[in-house]
Amino acid sequence: MPHIIQDAVTLFVIIDPIALVPIFISITHRQEPQERQKIALRAVLLSAVVLGGFLVFGQFLLTALGVSLSAFQIGGGLVLLIVGLQMVLEQQQNNDPEKSATPIGDVAVFPLAIPFIAGPGAIMSVVLLTDNDKFGVPDQAITAGIMLGILGFTYLILMQSEGIQKLLGETGANIITRIIGLIVVAIAIQTMLTGIRNFFNLP
């Protein structure tokens, strides 16, 4: 149960479905409702493929490259720390659809799926949460199920994005983003400390 709770909290705060709401509105404001639904579905499915691939093959890739999991924990922790600090310290953004630039290409792929949903932090998290040296196949399957559940929740959030944006308001969304940012910072520091402890074989 502690492992399940840790996985769920970690993946939720890293993917951060609530913070995706203003981003999704901004990059899809010119689309019809049906097209927005398709964009959200493609983005979530692509994110599931990317994260699932790293969940299964990520550690084997690190081994092939000669990168230890401890080094990946420290490096990934630094990335998470930067992401968390950006969430806490970022300036209030203007999400006025009329002033937002329309991205070129398939927005479901970039920037929605990568890097907003399946970003470096999420990739790092699924690799660490399925460490072959710590967790067996049943635990890894549970982590995969949790990941898919959070991605499904993300899709539902994106489908209700306009209503959520109106409910929270700009101030509410900013407060939630900063609180989640603090949690990400704490997770990042803990990840780096774990990597350092494992690298030096400290108790």
Image (cartoon, rainbow, N blue to C red):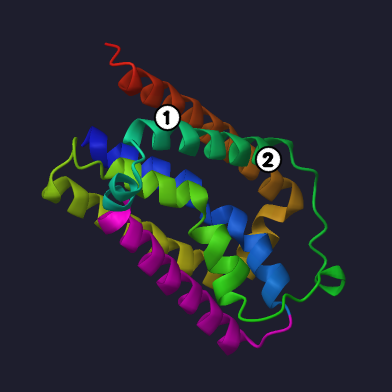
The residue to which callout 2 is attached is 86
Q: Residue at x 42, y 29 (%)?
A: 191
Q: Quadrant of the N terminus?
A: top left
Q: Main secondary structure of the magenta part?
A: helix
Give the x, y percent position of residue 66. 33, 42
Element at label 1 = helix
Residue where numbered disc 1 is placed: 191
Residue at the image position 18 percent from the left and 36 percent from the top: 133
Q: Position of residue 23 (x, y in %)?
A: 67, 63
Residue 43 is a magenta residue: yes
Q: Is residue 67 magenta?
A: no
Q: Earlier in the sequence, mark 2 or mark 1?
A: 2
Q: Which quarter of the figure has residue 182?
A: top right
What is the x, y in percent for residue 190? Answer: 44, 25
User: Is residue 81 or residue 69 the one in the foreground?
Assistant: 69
Residue at the limit of the structure toward the right, as seen here: 99
Q: Amino acid at mark 1?
A: Thr
Image check: 202 left or right of 11?
Answer: left
For mark 2, does the 10 Å Cα neighbourhood hold few (<14), some (14 to 19), or many (20 or more) residues?
Answer: some
Dot 1 alpha-carbon crowd within 10 angstroms: few under 14, some 14 to 19, many 20 or more: many
Q: Which residues are magenta?
A: 30-58
In this rendering, position of residue 16 left or right of residue 66? right
